[in-house]
Amino acid sequence: MSAVRNMMRYKAFSLLNIMGLALGMACSILILLWVQDEKSVDGMQSKNLYIVYERQFIDNKIDGGYYTPGILANEMKRNIPEIEYASNLSTIGYPDRLTFQAEDKIMKFDGSYADSDYFKMMNYPLLKGNKATALNSPVSLCISEKMAKAFFGSADAAVGKTLRYENRKDLTVSGVFADLPANVTDKFDFVINWATYLEENSWAKEWGNDGPNTLIYLHDNANAKLVDSKIRKFLDNYNKEQTASFRIELHMQPFRDLYLNSNFKDGFITGGRIQYVKLFSIVAVFILLIACINFMNLTTARSAKRAKEIGVRKVAGAIKPVLMRQFLSEALLITAISVVLSLILVVVLLPYFNQLTEKQIAFPYSNVYFWISVVLLTFITGLASGIYPAVFLSSFKPITVLKGTLKFSNGSAFLRKGLVVFQFALSIILITGTIIVSQQIKFIQSINLGYDRENLIYVPVEGELRKQYKVFKEQALNSTGIKSVTRIGETPTNIGSGTGGVNWEGKDPNSSVNFTNTFEGYDFVKTLNLKLVAGRDISKDFASDSAGYLINESALKVIGYKDPVGKPLTFWGQKGTIVGVLKDFHFSSLHDPINPLILRNGENSTRGNILVRTEPGKTKQALASLEKICKDLNPKFPFTYSFSDEEYQKLYKSEQVVSKLSGWFAFLGIFISCLGLLGLAMFTAEQRTKEIGIRKVLGASVTSLFTLLSRDFIVLVVISMAIATPLAWWAMHNWLQDFAYKVPIQMWVFGVAGILAILIALITVSFQAIKAAMANPVKSLRTE
């Protein structure tokens, strides 16, 4: 009861304490829910499930990636007894969704191609069908419950029915799986037997070409390290393009680790999203520490007011342990109230937090471990924030207190100031990180990619457009708002297919290079606004261009031709000539450097994407024209399109989320720190009441007194800045290493963060300082 009475007696202090702790704990709980959600992705999969990745040794350079040959899985299963199941895998998602039809219903869905072992390996429950046989037939199709309901009304009604796939092949529904949860790496609504993929992508049958993924599932008693050693040189007997200067090693990674660890350096996995998980876990602890420090400072700030109470109680016989228990009970009570408020805040803010992070996190009402964690958090936070004030307050000597000669040691003052320095150092690190992350995101959004991504639309080549592309292009060019039209095998933001099947005059027979490659249509350079450094684009005006190639500057450096235009080049055994050299442009994420690129003639291809350049300000009219053309030429398929600039932004969703979160965390950190600074200002003003009164009597102005009281706090913030600057530089330097193209870290950023912290500190202490400076000196001296 005494804890409640004291809390009610000092309402302002109690309110500040509760507010600071509640905000800090709510923020920490939200972060930890996000961390838990990140760690849960693919957590339902077996520890026996692995994904295979390549380490490519190319002329003293080592690259790594998950792309593998499309016929690798079954060959590994046949030759390595520890592998129980294996499957190739290729996932198709937006904007390349595939079209299915049942009677008059035509819809698009995301999905995958996989081998017959796929559902035996994955812990995705089948509602209908048998995992052992669901994908055994070349015309097998497994669909999600959502897709089954969309076409047939229920999962029961779907099994055995036929769906028309891309209006060119009938597939039979052999199984229905439960809709995938949110915490999976790739969400999909159908799985088609791998034979269909190989029919449509003959290049995937060649050992020298990479593209799909390979999954393997080991027997329970298998030794993973032994299997990894067995597969290391597996391709030596299959990929005949390997030489002394080009070879490929295979390794494997637990599938459950893929989502958080997918970045490569020197061919090895070196992290990925796990860095953000670690970063925000640390931020959660930091913010909670800031809140606890705030509690300590506010509690010790009111120590002078409670000094006589403590003295009287000690004279009356209260011993130190009893007093410590009282102060700890007060801390635990305030913490418990703060926890309740923080949980209410979490429930209220969770929908907005989900919108910010693009998650579907639910409040874990029924999770026993969550509530146990909350109880532990309450006790740990209460003890951490209350132990110092309890020891500090219970140590007052009654004689000194009752005589009115209470003085605080330099040690206790040093500790309080040190806590404020620590708070502001963390806050300055958060502010600096926010600025640099925002700079990098802005740099990514504004960088010149080497082509114009504005007013550029992708339309997938599907259905009748495979045959009617020429008609489509002719009609589109005669439509309102459309400037030019071309085609490409992959989208310009995600060209990833690689091959070593390239030869040229003078090539070292022992040398091999992996070239990124795709095909292009006529008017490609014009439509993307690319720059040519030599030669011209592939054109219909030259019959020889059926075997013509465009290369980028990076490819030219590898090939070594001094006058490349007209020089011979052989790609996948087809002899041709180089017709032009493109200035290097970015065709993947800025996390990656620009690789050697070869573009071949694909004007008559039956797949890929159509690229449409619209006139500025006429996008709406252009889309209306394109929709009409597609409905006339391709009535069996819904009109589908995407914008190049939007697809580019999707490459950096993680960074954008980090930028937003870091901004909010920095704001909360500095706000809670200011509460602690306010407590220290109140404490200092109380301690210097007599000094201020004497100075006023001697003629000191309000301005000089304000400067006197504020100076010490500014010094603390400057010290915080000195400590935070190298730490912030180190943290952001490491973060930027994930980008091949990045902004430089400029010193003015640290200056801005420091000045901002100083201004916030001045605003925080100004009210208390001015109040103390304007107090009546007669009253303050009489009180003393």
Image (tube, rainbow, N blue to C red):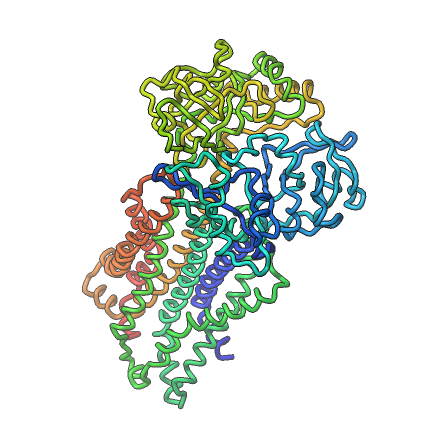
Near-viewer residue (452 or 437): 452
Near-viewer residue (257 or 30): 257
* The C terminus, quarter of image: bottom left
- The residue at the point 54 percent across, 25 percent down is 457
Q: From the viewer's perspective, is 504 left or right of 685?
A: right
- Residue 781 is drawn in which quadrant? bottom left
Q: Position of residue 456 (x, y in %)?
A: 51, 24
- The residue at the point 46 percent across, 63 percent down is 21
Q: From the viewer's perspective, is 50 left or right of 526?
A: right
Near-viewer residue (759 or 668): 668
- Residue 402 is drawn in which quadrant? bottom left
Given the current orientation, which residue lies at the most extreme left position?
A: 698
Q: Position of residue 281 (x, y in %)?
A: 45, 57
Q: Position of residue 543 (x, y in %)?
A: 50, 10
* 78 vs 513: above or below: below
Question: Would residue 391 be seen by someone viewing this image from the given angle?
Answer: yes
Given the current orientation, which residue lies at the most extreme top position?
A: 541
- Residue 161 is drawn in which quadrant? top right
* 461 vs 227: above or below: above
* 1 vs 71: above or below: below
Q: Position of residue 587 (x, y in %)?
A: 45, 31
Number of labels in the image equals: 0
Given the current orientation, which residue lies at the most extreme right position?
A: 157
Question: Would residue 702 be seen by someone viewing this image from the given angle?
Answer: no
Q: From the viewer's perspective, is 166 left or right of 399?
A: right
Near-viewer residue (83 or 286): 83
